[in-house]
Amino acid sequence: MRGPIALKAKRFVDIVAASAVIAVTLPITAVVALAIKATSRGPVFFVQSRVGQFEQPFDLLKFRTMRIDADDGEHRAYQERLLAGEAEAGTDDGIYKLDDPRVTRVGSFLRRYSIDELPQMINVVKGEMSLVGPRPALQWEVDLFSDRHRLRARAVPGCSGLWQVSGRNLMSSLEMLDLDVEYVETFSFWRDLQILVKTPMAILRGDGAR
């Protein structure tokens, strides 16, 4: 299923599924909020401006997993080298590693099972994100993308996506961007469903950690 009908079906699934997840995980949300407040200083939620469809900004929601005084300078510099093809990806690539000193102990657990991303269901209900789509990038990342990689902005960004279920910890940033563009260019409703089915197993394997 492709075209406008597929997009309407995709949006219907997004609203129904995200609303159900919000309702079902309310007890988890309460426990996570208490754990974050009890173990580190700062707010429960982390709000960050990301680039959405057609490169329009929106506020991404997550549970806070880092110290509030965390400096992302080293991480950003490494990411810039990755996007420029000047560094090799690996399990300690600065995006997914769980022993990042900026991450709290509770945050490490939340990232390991992608629990920190549960608040993004609110973004999905609002239409700022989809259950499946390209990863919502930061503006400085988009500024470094090639023209071809900027084609990924044709789609609504997603909580999961093609590269997330394709062994993402073993891929370079450029390979991930290539898969995002492939997703946009070959979008179908049925492929979205296939990605959704594969997502829980990817999370259990730890591929969802970041």
Image: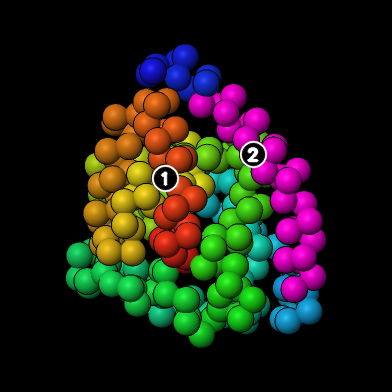
Q: Residue at x 69, y 38 (%)?
A: 20
Total number of numbered labels?
A: 2
Earlier residue among tags 1 and 2: 2
Q: What residue is pinned by disc 1?
A: 198
Q: Amino acid at mark 2?
A: Ala
Which secondary structure lies at badge 1? Answer: helix
Q: Amino acid at mark 1?
A: Lys
- Residue 6 lies in what quarter of the image? top left
Q: Which residues are magenta?
A: 10-35
Q: Residue at x 64, y 31 (%)?
A: 15
Is 144 one of the magenta-colored residues? no
Q: What residue is pinned by disc 2?
A: 18
Q: Which mark is residue 127?
A: none
Of residue 81 and residue 31, the one placed in the foreground of this image is: 31
Q: Are marks 1 and 2 in contact (CB under 8 Å)?
A: no
**Residue 87 in the figure: left or right of residue 207:** left
Is 33 one of the magenta-colored residues? yes
Q: Residue at x 42, y 62 (%)?
A: 205
